[in-house]
Amino acid sequence: SQQGEEDPQALSIQEGENATMNCSYKTSINNLQWYRQNSGRGLVHLILIRSNEREKHSGRLRVTLDTSKKSSSLLITASRAADTASYFCATGLVNQAGTALIFGKGTTLSVSS
Amino acid sequence: SQTIHQWPATLVQPVGSPLSLECTVEGTSNPNLYWYRQAAGRGLQLLFYSVGIGQISSEVPQNLSASRPQDRQFILSSKKLLLSDSGFYLCAWSSGNEDTQYFGPGTRLTVL
């Protein structure tokens, strides 16, 4: 069954606006990661946040994690047309380090200029 | 630096034909290796993972199999393809107990 579920499924914004994507999960986790996928390509790792962290930044990306609500959000600030892609959250399950990540179905982000 | 290769990039096969997709990793030793399948507009489904040569764990029972004949080589196979095997197949690797995975460019498989 799907561990992570992203919301919304699709998001369309203008360049310069901020984009926020959410992810909910069901079971206890070691960490939560966000990946990006351009159409027809492999996934690229963006950021990892551990279960004992609440917020993490990387460039224009900001990720929050609320383990009490079993949810995370990815904020992309000052979006660009090049940010157009699908974004997936993935959870690393407790006691399964290095073995399995469970991916959500993704949010498709479209940034128009 | 580490790199991961997959081939072929695209493949069109008839139903009932065999399949062999290959994935190789360079620049690291004893990686954990993974095969995923992504159906159109869907998320990733983990098919197999391997923590060492000859060690394969299957997540989803199906007509696919995986093998790891060498430390940095991971092969996905089928004896007889089904229409439902169509999809985008992604190989990934991770290092030791690190959870971050690094993905190859993928193989687009169409079964007709």
Image (spheres, rainbow, N blue to C red):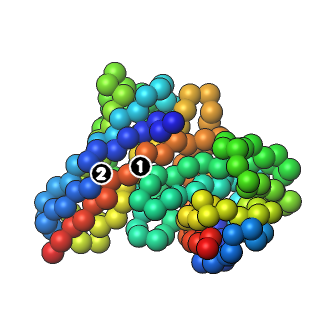
Q: Is residue A2 above or below residue A43?
A: above
Q: Is residue A100 above or below residue A39?
A: above
Numbered disc total: 2
The residue lying toward the viewer, choosing from A60 and A11, is A11
Question: Which residue in the protein does label 2 denote?
Answer: A9
User: Is A92 on the left-hand or right-hand side of B51?
Assistant: left
Residue A84 locus on image (x, y percent): 29, 67
Q: Residue at x 34, y 40 (%)?
A: A23
The residue lying toward the viewer, choosing from A75 and B43, is B43
Q: CA distance from mark 1 to mark 2?
A: 8 Å
- Chain of the residue under the numbered disc 1 shown in the image: A
Residue B41 locus on image (x, y percent): 41, 59
Of the 4 image quadrants, the one containing the C terminus of chain A is bottom left
User: Is A106 on the left-hand or right-hand side of B19?
Assistant: left
The answer to whether residue B1 is visible is no
Question: Which residue in the protein does label 1 denote?
Answer: A105
Q: Is residue A20 above or below residue B23?
A: above
Q: Give neighbour class at mark 2: few <14, some 14-19, many 20+ (Cα, 10 Å).
A: some
Q: Residue at x 32, y 29 (%)?
A: A66
Mark 1 vs 2, N-terminal side: 2
Residue B91 locus on image (x, y percent): 63, 60
SS under mark 1: loop
